[in-house]
């Protein structure tokens, strides 16, 4: 007999010291139901999932109060491995893949198919031979299920982030006896087409009786596929509702606890940008970034402008900032305020007044094992030799100045943490993004490049970051290049938007241009160049 509920969270509370992060949380998920769990960063979603999966951070900090039930039976898993054995899977916002392994090896890791050998018959199963043919066959089947046309033999290293996300999903789909799947921001790095495909996959899985917990900040997706929505705010479930009984505005208001206002004040937009001097001159830029190749982009960006770069994943928009920063091989000419960038010198752009917030915050943007304050100050110390004090013939770090500045940035950007000494790797994804931005702002750049600045960030944090970017432009004259997959955000903040398709600029549009113009440019149907 099928249980009434696959998952039940009953009166769950959790404290870290004196900090109560979950307060009497209760909800349930039925078989075959897509249950959306939404809330701002720091609302408690990650802690709930840590409890569900038996993460060590929960056990090592006194456990939790309340009950977790799986198929009606109490469950208090000692480790994530126990949770997986019980039929719970998770697709993470931050990828849990091994770059040096193939797609098939990543999908089958921990569940490899093997065949007996003479040695294994004598000495045991550990000496069995990998059945790579069967592993590749299973991997291909899982990839086909989600409509992903990718070679299962290729290595994960160098794949575009969108492809990596689908590999993660295929890995979970390949598991046998899955009862519950947790999707943690699964569409954050996907294009609209890929995201739509993923949502259909979720519905297909739910139709097979698999329960799904869908954690996302994209409320439109929630309204499209969820049967019920639970809003978590400050560690409490403030409302559980059906999509047909609410709308996006109401859900957003419940998440942040206040009325959602317009993201940017039009009165803050400076005049006469058309006649301002050129801040960034890009001429025939080619960048060899796997999955994001740039093929001869030319752009002029004005001083004080917020210039957007958009387009579908894999079309080259991400390659532009990575090429400018020298992170991937690049040729062509890039001048920043009249100074030519030397691509061969890693960090040359930083020394010429450029700060960069990478889309790959964990791989490029952060030192995950170091503190918040050290991450914020690192580039300023390395590039500008700031936060140093003379001590005889040597210079030492001024821990006091670093701490004071970090506290100011934590307050300014509302970084949800226990303090400046907290390890960055222990923060939620959204708060890690804020630390990346704080590090960039600490350089006091003339040009700020932000790549996917709101990926995986809640509505309230998005608004805060967007407003701060506008403030930087208006009060400090910072020129900003914003690269994003979120066209709505680009249109809400940017003065002009370049749409990149097949490695080249298809068109440059004003934010109030017709939707059809953006659609045609992103699809590659229009290639008028700069206008």
Image (cartoon, helix red, strand yellow):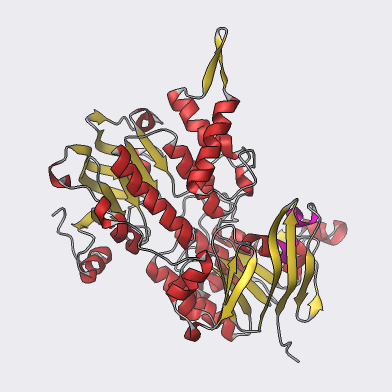
Q: Position of residue 388 (x, y in %)?
A: 52, 20
Nearest the viewer among 147 and 233 is 233
Figure quadrant of the C terminus: bottom left
168 left or right, relative to 499: right
Nearest the viewer among 318 and 384 is 384
Taking the image as drawn, is residue 427 in sight?
yes
As drawn, the residue found furthest toward the right would be 122
Q: Position of residue 420 (x, y in %)?
A: 61, 39
Q: Does 158 appear above or below 165?
A: above
Magenta-colored stretch includes residue 52: yes
Q: Position of residue 359 (x, y in %)?
A: 44, 50
Nearest the viewer among 508 and 500 is 508
Overall secondary structure of the magenta stretch? helix
As drawn, the residue found furthest toward the top would be 393
376 left or right, relative to 485: right
Seen at 51% across and 59% down, the residue is: 164
Q: Does 216 appear above or below 395?
A: below
Nearest the viewer among 191 and 174 is 191
531 left or right, relative to 181: left
Seen at 40% across and 31% down, the residue is: 347
Q: Does 242 appear above or below 144?
A: below
Q: Which stretch did the figure color magenta? A: 50-59
Seen at 60% across and 50% down, the residue is: 427
Magenta-colored stretch includes residue 345: no
222 left or right, relative to 20: left
Taking the image as drawn, is residue 454 in sight?
no
Seen at 38% across and 53% down, the residue is: 466
């Amino acid at each position: 007999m099928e249980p009434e509920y696959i998952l039940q969270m009953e009166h769950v509370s959790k404290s870290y010291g004196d900090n109560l992060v979950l307060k009497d949380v209760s909800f349930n998920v039925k078989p075959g139901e897509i249950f959306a769990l939404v809330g701002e960063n720091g609302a408690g979603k990650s802690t709930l999932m840590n409890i569900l999966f038996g993460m060590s951070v929960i056990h090592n900090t006194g456990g939790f109060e309340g009950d977790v039930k799986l198929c009606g039976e109490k469950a208090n898993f000692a480790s994530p491995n126990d949770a997986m054995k019980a039929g719970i899977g998770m697709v993470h916002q931050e990828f849990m893949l091994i770059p040096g392994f193939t797609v098939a090896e990543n999908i089958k890791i921990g569940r490899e198919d093997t065949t007996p050998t003479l040695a294994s018959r004598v000495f045991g199963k550990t000496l069995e031979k990998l059945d790579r043919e069967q592993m590749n066959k299973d991997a291909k089947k899982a990839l086909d299920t989600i409509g992903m046309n990718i070679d299962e033999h290729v290595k994960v290293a160098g794949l575009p982030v969108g492809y990596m996300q689908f590999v993660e999903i295929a890995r979970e789909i390949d598991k046998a006896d899955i009862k519950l799947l947790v999707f943690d921001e699964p569409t954050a790095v996907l294009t609209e087409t890929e995201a739509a495909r993923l949502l259909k996959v979720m519905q297909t899985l739910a139709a097979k009786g698999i329960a799904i917990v869908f954690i996302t900040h994209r409320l439109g997706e929630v309204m499209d596929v969820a049967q019920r929505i639970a809003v978590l705010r400050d560690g409490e479930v403030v409302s559980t509702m059906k999509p047909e009984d609410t709308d996006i505005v109401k859900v957003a208001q419940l998440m942040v606890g206040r009325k959602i206002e317009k993201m940017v004040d039009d009165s803050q937009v400076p005049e006469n940008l058309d006649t301002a001097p050129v801040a960034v001159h890009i001429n025939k830029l080619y960048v060899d970034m796997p999955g994001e190749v740039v093929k001869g982009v030319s752009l002029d960006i004005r001083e004080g402008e917020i210039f957007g770069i958009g387009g579908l994943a894999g079309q080259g928009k991400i390659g532009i900032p990575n090429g400018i920063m020298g992170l991937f091989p690049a040729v062509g000419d890039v001048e920043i305020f009249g100074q030519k960038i030397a691509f061969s010198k890693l960090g040359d752009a930083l020394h010429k007044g450029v700060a960069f917030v990478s889309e790959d915050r964990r791989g490029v943007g952060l030192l995950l094992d170091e503190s918040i304050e050290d991450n914020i100050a690192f580039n300023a110390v390395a590039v500008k030799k700031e936060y140093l004090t003379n001590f005889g013939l040597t210079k030492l770090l001024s821990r006091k100045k670093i701490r004071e500045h970090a506290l100011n940035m934590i307050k300014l950007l509302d970084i949800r943490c226990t303090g400046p000494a907290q390890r960055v790797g222990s923060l939620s994804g959204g708060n890690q993004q804020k630390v990346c931005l704080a590090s960039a702002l600490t350089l006091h750049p003339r040009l700020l490049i932000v790549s996917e600045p709101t990926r995986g960030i809640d509505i309230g944090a998005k608004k805060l970051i967007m407003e701060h970017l506008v403030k930087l432009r208006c009060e400090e004259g910072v020129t900003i290049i914003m690269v994003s997959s979120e066209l709505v955000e680009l249109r809400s903040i940017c003065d002009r938007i370049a749409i990149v398709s097949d490695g080249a600029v298809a068109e440059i549009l004003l934010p109030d241009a017709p939707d059809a113009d953006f659609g045609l440019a992103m699809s590659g149907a229009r290639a008028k160049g700069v206008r």
